[in-house]
Image (spheres, rainbow, N blue to C red):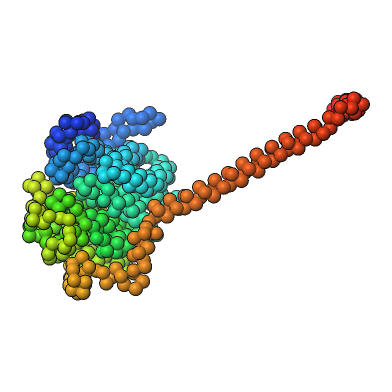
Amino acid sequence: MSPNLLLLAILVPAAAGVLALLMRGRAGAVSGPWALLATAANLGLGIFLFDKQADLNLPWAGFGLQFVLRLYQFSGFIVLATACFGLLVALYSIRFMAGRANRNQFYGWMLLSLAMVNGAVLANHLVVLLFFWEGLLGTLFAMIAIGRPGAWRTATKAFIIIGISDVCMMLGMALAGWQAHTLIISDIHLPLTTSVCTAAFVLLMIGAISKGGSMPFHSWIPDAAVDAPLPFMAFLPASLEKLLGIYWLARISLDLFELTPDAWVSPLMMIVGAATILLAVSMALVQKDYKRLLAYHAISQVGYMVLGIGTAVPLGIVGGLFHMLNNAIYKSGLFLTGGAVEHATGTTDLKQLGGLGRRMPVTFACFFILAASISGVPWTNGFFSKELIYDGALARHWIFYAAALLGSVLTAASFLKLGHAAYLGKPAENSDVKFDQVREAPPSMLLPIVILAAACLVFGLGNALPIDHLIAPAFAGTHFAAAEHGAAEHFAGWPESSMLVLMTCLALAAAIINHLLGAKRAGSGLGAVDHIHHAPGLAQIYDAAGKRYFDPYDIGMALAKVASRILWLIDRLIDGVVAGLTSGTARGAGYAVSAAHTGSYALYVVWSILGAAAVAAYMLMH
């Protein structure tokens, strides 16, 4: 295979994106079909490149920098996965974005995002990776900003949060390159035995988990769920950014550094993962909007991936990578069901919905499968990847397993609430939705949802296929290669630990019982978790969270305002002192000189003689 074909994975979607941006006015009507054609071509290229190997090295940017790309099993898998999601979202968006004035911009930035992701995944040079990584930040900003009026504020928030984490990643790249004496990614293999290498790992990890949407770099995602066009959520936060961020985290842990359970960064990653799981799912539990609830789950689920990789044991890492793929499937599908509901009813406010299952049966059936998958119901893909993560977490410490299992309980509880409130029961009273006019989503929107729901079952019942052919190749050439083979054999279709499966079933049963009792007590599915929301102690915490008191971005902005005010006061003080001292001295000197000029010629002669004597004395001394 010619290495130049790697350039097509970047140039094809990039060129198509630029052309879509130029399709203004009436030409914007064809931007959707054009994007569908371009994403289909990108998928065809991804299929061709899959399971192949190639290297490309071209002069670039001067100063000895090379444009280095590398295709191997792991990067080929990610390119293929992103191409699949790109095509499905493009197909879905044709109807969803129809008639919108900015649809050509949506498709343009979407295609450019695909190009940036492909470039970042294929990059084999830290500077090349950084180039595409930052390019994706620009397209993310643009895709949020074209949403509803005022969305630029959320876009700015996302840009600042991710930009700060990217600065950390730049520093990590510099340290890693310095220690390895090279910027070629495949040539960097550093032990986590020195403080410099450990610092480099942590800084690079910050960039990876931020791109994946982990806490504390998360708070823009729920806002974007409301402000940005809904297909954006299925495209970037739910799928492409998760794939890219966790891909890079895996590369850091497996290739660039030798992550072992003995390294202190391993428990650090597990703590970040466990905290992300619990804090984000706790917020998802109390949301009253379809899209915001899903947005918090998009954050929570990345915690499982970080936790799995952070265990530094083969079962956990396999589970984290498998969950990366599974999450992209069911989370994209769930966001698309939210778009179908919004398209049919005009709202995603759960207070306005109810009884949609009878009028949107296909959407409801797909939602049921997708929700079961994210909740870890047996025989779905989410169940199998979570069981691997549970196994790896338990091998390190029971507290991490307990946090992950509790997260699954709350995940199931929140989706029982969402499904009950939106699809079951009776239509909401005093709702603005005209339920008698609600119809199933059009076929072009349903097909991607059905495909993603079916994939949850296929990758669940046939889990050995993705693990053996998609996940396992990521370990080739790493210090985990031999152990991973044993992990795959250990998994063999169904978890060996009956205890873990039993605990999962008990957790799901607890979520169901909680929902039934809570819904009966509140009189509605929407209020099924109100007893948790308003529990003593939790109510105050939830209230503070609702007022954004815990939002790292808002905290940072508040501190920045205080700092800027203090610096302004210091500036005014210094300016006042300097200006006052200068002007005061000048005025005093002026008054003294003015007072000395009395008009007496004799006094002036004395001054002249004294001055001449002083000059003469100085000259004699020197």
Q: Nearer the viewer, residue 246 or 609?
A: 609
In the picture, the quarter occupied by the N terminus is: top left
Q: How many marks?
A: 0
Is residue 280 shown to the viewer in this render? yes
- Residue at x 73% of width, y 36% of height: 587
Image coordinates of residue 469 in percent, x first then y, are 16, 50
Image coordinates of residue 91 in percent, x first then y, are 13, 43
Q: Nearer the viewer, residue 537 or 462?
A: 537
- Residue at x 31% of width, y 33% of height: 67
- Residue at x 32% of width, y 62% of height: 279
Image coordinates of residue 272 in percent, x first then y, are 35, 59
Instruction: Left or right? Give the position of 212 relative to 516.
Output: right
- Residue at x 76% of width, y 33% of height: 590
Q: Nearer the viewer, residue 364 or 175?
A: 364
In the picture, the quarter occupied by the C terminus is: top right
Is residue 314 shown to the viewer in this render? no
Q: From this view, report whether residue 210 is shown above or below residue 270.
A: above
Q: Nearer the viewer, residue 42 or 54?
A: 42
The answer to which quarter of the image holds residue 378 is bottom left
Q: From this view, report whether residue 55 is shown above or below residue 397.
A: above
Q: From this view, report whether residue 602 is shown above or below residue 48.
A: above
Image coordinates of residue 224 in percent, x first then y, are 28, 49
Instruction: Left or right? Give the position of 461 relative to 592.
Output: left
